[in-house]
Amino acid sequence: MDALTTRPLNDMDFDEFSSFVRACGGQERQARRLFAALYRPGRDVAAGLLGKLDEVSPRVVDHVTAAPWGRLRVVDRRQASDGFVKYLFESPLGGRFEAVRIPLFDKKHVVCVSSQVGCALGCAFCATGRLGFSRNLETWEMVEQLRVVRDEARLPVRHAVFMGMGEPFLNYERVLRAASLFTRSGGLQISGRNLTISTAGIAPAIERFTREGHPFRLTFSLTSAIPEKRLELMPVERAYPLPVLVEAIRAFTRARGERAVIAYVVIRGVNTGPEDVEALRQLFEGIPIKLDLIDVCDASGRFQPPDAEELRRFRDLLQVLKVPIGRRYSGGAEIGASCGNLAATAQGGTALERDS
């Protein structure tokens, strides 16, 4: 019991939490009740708001209430005119990082979660990459991002994406534990099919994910199918070259029986030409994919999104691939909340004390 209680409860998966409850004299069915009580909206363990639970002894409840619970400080909340809300968090373990609440058709929210403080990959168009890497986030730090945002949201949170600061697959074990807590029945209750992990192409982790058979979705960031061009934009190409990445994606599609979602950041005059389309055609020949186009959002001004005519020409050229082509809206630009802009700073928009 001592070894378990040194870790925050929100760092434990359900099996670990159940072991802790049994060590306190409880039973697994009581662990399920306590687990659900801990993660219900608005609860506060420190304030003793677990309440009286049927069939759970007060002594076990007291043990759970007294156990550590990891907490983040909300440094700032900013809302953009399009409804995106960016949270700036500070951890007692050190460092600041961000999460974004994304409105979805005015009926529910998506929460974009960070997995690292900074990022080691150094993508040329990404503000997080320019920060460099500080450390991996613990599972509880990811859980708290989602829990805090969910508890303040006016609408239900039904989706979560690991697309914030950092490369999730360089923090594989903690991210997968957090994902299991996000989707656990009685936990944060997001469907496994509504949780997406985005990777820039860490091939060994993709292969491991495929072998382990997780229910979560993956998105693969590509940005160019031309190795030399991709290397300039995404240095991860040096460690995991396109042929290695594509074989991992091929195995993923075969195991899952579904299309791989390829995220393609479109950049004016850089990766929207006929040669880029032909490289895509050759690279993914025989592999079922869906291509998601995302406008580059580079606060430095070095890279610009294509204008309407360039984008139209590119989309026309892409028809040769005969694959579904989507357009991903990257909102919250005025508060630094759009794709590639998270840099652990407060800027723009409307400052919020709490959700309105």
Image (cartoon, rainbow, N blue to C red):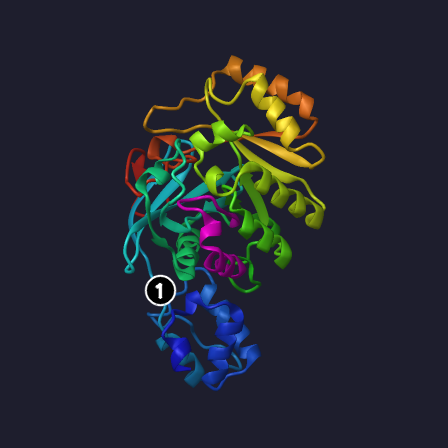
Instruction: Residue at 43%, 79% (x, y): give it.
Output: 61
Q: Which residues are magenta?
A: 157-181
Can you give x and y, in whole percent of width and height, for residue 192 in the image?
59, 54
Instruction: From the top left corner, tell me how far across and down residue 67 is, in percent.
Output: 37, 75
Q: Quadrant of residue 296?
A: top left
Q: Quadrant of residue 290?
A: top right
Tell which of 269 and 305 is nearer to you. 269
Instruction: Report the number of discs.
Output: 1
The residue pinned by badge 1 equals 70
Position of residue 282 measured from the top left corner of the image (x, y, whole percent): 65, 28
Q: Is residue 62 in view from this perspective?
A: no
Rate crowding at label 1 as few (under 14), some (14 to 19) or many (20 or more) other CA atoms within 10 Å: some
Task: State yes or no: residue 167 in magenta.
Answer: yes
Pick whichever, 282 or 124, lies toward us: 282
Q: Is 179 one of the magenta-colored residues?
A: yes
Q: Nearer the viewer, residue 335 or 136?
A: 136
Left or right of 142, for residue 253: right
Element marked by disc 1:
loop
Q: Amino acid at mark 1?
A: Gly
Point out residue 80 in the picture as x, y percentages from the top left corner: 37, 34
Q: From the viewer's perspective, is residue 176 above or below residue 38? A: above
Question: What residue is drawn where x is 66% and y is 30%?
Answer: 324
Quadrant where the image shows the N terminus: bottom left
Q: Is residue 124 visible?
A: yes
Instruction: Residue 249: name its quadrant.
Output: top right
Residue 100 vs residue 47, the one in the foreground: 100
Q: Residue lying farthest top?
A: 309
Identified at 60% across, 30% down, the residue is 326
Residue at image location 69% in from the left, 37% down from the top: 287
In the rendered view, would you say 330 is above or below 58?
above
In the displayed structure, does residue 216 sit left or right of residue 36?
A: right
Of the 4 image quadrants, the one containing the C terminus is: top left
